Amino acid sequence: MMMLREAGWKVTLRNEKRLHHPDEDFYYMARAKYFVVGVGGFSDIIGRLVRRSHGQVVGRILESKILD
């Protein structure tokens, strides 16, 4: 996170002290203007949803047929 901020990106974190429902997290991530993709399938799906809604995905999206 600090690396992204130092590079000039605006980074928003949800309140870490409050537990969130995973569906809420999915909702916020899928609607992000920018999303940094991790290496897992969950991150891949969210990255595809972000790209579909014309957001920018940073990183590599796997070559699967999910959501294509």
Image (cartoon, rainbow, N blue to C red):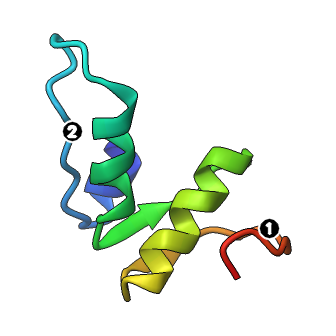
Front tag of 2 and 1: 1
Residue 23: name its quadrant: top left
Q: Is residue 11 placed above or below 58 in the rendered structure?
A: above
Q: Amino acid at mark 1?
A: Leu
Residue occupying the point 18% across, 48% down:
12
Q: Earlier in the sequence, mark 2 or mark 1?
A: 2
Quadrant in which the N terminus appears: top left
Q: Position of residue 54 (x, y in %)?
A: 37, 88
Quadrant in which the C terminus appears: bottom right
Tell whether 68 sits left or right of 4. Answer: right
Mark 2–mark 1 CB contact (< 8 Å):
no
Q: Position of residue 22 (x, y in %)?
A: 39, 29
Residue occupying the point 37% across, 81% down:
55
Residue 44: name its quadrant: bottom right
Q: Is residue 55 placed above or below 1 in the rendered structure?
A: below
Label 1 CA crowd tier, 10 Å (few <14, some 14–19, many 20+): some
Residue occupying the point 24% across, 67% down:
8
Q: Position of residue 42 (x, y in %)?
A: 63, 46
Mark on residue 13? 2
Q: Is residue 40 placed above or below 35 in the rendered structure?
A: above
Tell whether 45 sits left or right of 20. Answer: right
Residue occupying the point 27% across, 51% down:
28
- Which element is circle 2 on? loop
Mark on residue 19? none
**Where is mark 1, residue-wise?**
62
Label 2 CA crowd tier, 10 Å (few <14, some 14–19, many 20+): few
